[in-house]
Image (tube, rainbow, N blue to C red):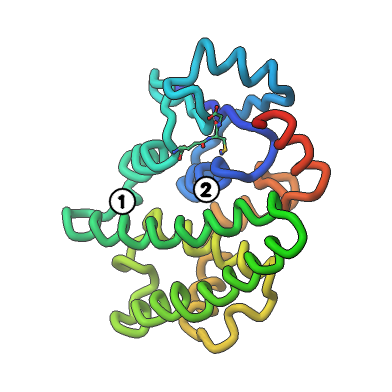
Amino acid sequence: MANKPVLHYVNGRGRMETIRWLLAAAGVEFEEKFFETKEQLQKLQKTELFFQQVPMVEIDGMKLVQTRAILHYIAEKYNLLGKDLKERALTIMYSEGIMDLMELIIICPFLKGEEQITRITEITNKAKTRYFPAFEKVFKSHGQNFLVSNQLSMADVQLFEVILMVEEKVPDALSGFPSLQAFKTRMSNLPTIKKFLAPGSKRKPMPDAKYVEEVIKIFF
Ligand code: GSN
């Protein structure tokens, strides 16, 4: 059997979490190597990291960096990138929009005071008036179970992840979006997703103050 992918990152969500979600959704087991100090990161930068940056994933004999390249490789390998050129374009278009929203959320814990409050308002507004209405419209327009077709894609996994991320900040974020609520229920019931949502999985918790402090020490 082929080796399991090995994920190199800190022991927290950041840019790696979506990669974890995608592998989990595809039913792929993976290993993780966490670095905990600046020195450990620097050693990795000198020897393993193509652009001196993480996330890095060892997979199929490659040491892949760049989050999107990693996601696309996994998605294509496990048939989560659409079945033809148009489905692939839509999957990536949806995925990029979702990642724009995710980026706002990932940075949020690292902002201080007023800046963080402003950011949470921005996340709430963008989710409720830009991204969620757009995806609600997609489901209403085609009546399918998943965004791009009746088959799960990377975009569905990311939409589900971002819904959970937004709800952690704004618990009623899906009120007024019935198709997204139904989508969330469908996704929660997929066996691989259910397993990843269960306690003891490799899903990482919401960043807390201790994690933020550790990450700042490592990267800055
Ligand atoms: O999407 C990507 O993977 C890249 N375009 C950006 C990756 C990145 O910025 N990595 C940071 C850690 S923050 N997020 O995971 C990083 O490795 N910084 C160390 C450095 O020296 O740049």
Q: Which secondary structure, mark 1?
A: loop
Q: Amino acid at mark 1?
A: Leu
Q: Quadrant of residue 212?
A: top right
Up-down relation of residue 36 to residue 141 (above or below)? above
Which residue lies under the disc numbered 2? 18
Q: Is mark 1 within 8 Å of ligand 1?
A: no
Q: Residue 133: x percent and y percent? A: 43, 81
Name the residue nearer the viewer: 41 or 220.
220
Q: Is residue 1 above or below residue 116?
A: above
21, 114: nearer the viewer: 114
Residue drawn at x 54%, y 52% is 192
Q: In the drawing, does residue 143 fall left or right of residue 175?
A: left
Q: Which mark is residue 102?
A: none
Q: What's the CA distance linking mark 2 and mark 1?
A: 15 Å
Q: Earlier in the sequence, mark 2 or mark 1?
A: 2
Q: How far across and down, in percent of the image, does residue 31 sit?
A: 59, 29
- Outermost residue toward the right? 210
Q: Identify which residue is drawn at 50% across, 62% down.
A: 101
Q: Residue furthest bottom?
A: 176
Q: Amino acid at mark 2?
A: Thr
Q: Mark 2–mark 1 contact, CB under 8 Å?
A: no
Q: Quadrant of the N terminus?
A: top left
Report whether 190 appears left or right of 172.
left
Per the image, the residue denoted by label 1 is 81
Specify few, some or many for label 2: CA neighbours under 10 Å numbering under 14, 14-19, or 20 or more: many
Picture coordinates of residue 215 (x, y %)?
71, 36
